[in-house]
Amino acid sequence: MNRATLIAQIYQKHSYLCVGLDTDIQKIPKHLHQEKDPIFAFNRQIIDATIDYCVAYKINIAFYESLGARGWESLEKTLAYIPNSVFTIADAKRGDIGNTSSLYAKAFFENMNFDSITVAPYMGQDSVSPFLTYPDKWVILLALTSNEGSRDFQMLKVQESAQDVEEFLFEKVLKISQLWGGEDQLMYVVGATHPQLFEKIRQLVPNHFLLVPGYGAQGGDLQALSKAGMNQDCGLLVNSSRGIIYASADKDFAQVAQKISKGIAEEMKIYLGQ
């Protein structure tokens, strides 16, 4: 999916909500365990319930690959069920030496046809570049994540020489990585748990899309992050996973997910000025 199509979807649906399909076999409603494929049965109902209110689905690969071959089968069926008009994210956090990254890119972009993949930047440009060779596919680079441990490295102060001003390591990532790919193929993960840094981040990457995890169950504030993080094209995909898909553990789980996603979309419409 190219940038123009993604932006059009945002303004057509009046939403920049991304629903995270972090589907844990231990957390889905018990009655679904009778299904031949419980994971897909759960995902299908969540998608049906939320499709009108979100523009993206983020599939956390770990929840599927941990189940072996049957997990991959559930993943492929889920991906095939999502309409092509909706942006898909493989939350795989890959990143390795060039030839290995080329194979990861082939797996997720050619074989599974995801629109995007999350990538770790720690190994540098040659570990990211293979993902950027696919037209209309996106790299979502980890910049400032929402977890508590993000402070261990991402918020370390670094200085290259005595003349350089100290900056956070994540700021270096944002600055240097822009030399690798443009705003039509490169997004950044910026956690909703760091709202005080959104204005600074927007100064560094004014036009790029930001994937924002940490909203909902992790406590991120939608109004604050929207005000500080939105650009002229919206430029945000705000993800909620547990707060939507596990809002109910009963047979009404899909209806509850629909109600919550609708409420989020209605709030987002206000911030979009529509």
Image: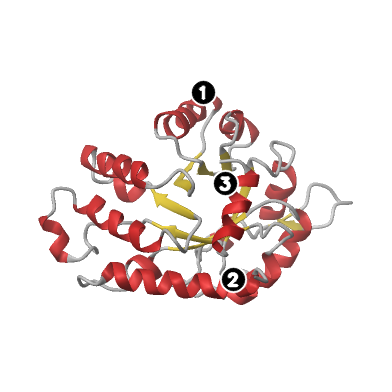
Residue annotated with mark 3: 140
Q: How crowded is mark 1: few (under 14 residues within 10 Å), some or many (20 or more)?
A: few
Given this view, does label 2 or label 3 mark the residue nearer the observer?
Answer: 2
In this rendering, the answer to whether 145 lies above or below 89 is below
Count the labels in the image. 3
> Amino acid type of disc 1?
Asn
- Left/right of residue 140 with respect to residue 38 in the rendered view: right
Observer-nearest residue: 197 or 253? 253
Q: Give the Cα distance between marks 2 and 3.
A: 24 Å
Contact flag, marks 2 and 3 (Cβ < 8 Å): no
Q: Residue furthest top?
A: 99
Per the image, label 1 sits on a secondary structure element best described as helix
Q: Give the Cα distance between marks 1 and 3.
A: 19 Å
Q: Looking at the image, tell me whether mark 1 or mark 2 is earlier in sequence order.
A: 1
Residue sitting at 61 percent across and 41 percent down?
2
Q: Looking at the image, tell me whether mark 2 or mark 3 is earlier in sequence order.
A: 3
> Amino acid type of disc 3?
Ile
- Left/right of residue 90 with respect to residue 179 in the rendered view: left
Residue annotated with mark 2: 269
Q: Which mark is residue 99?
A: 1
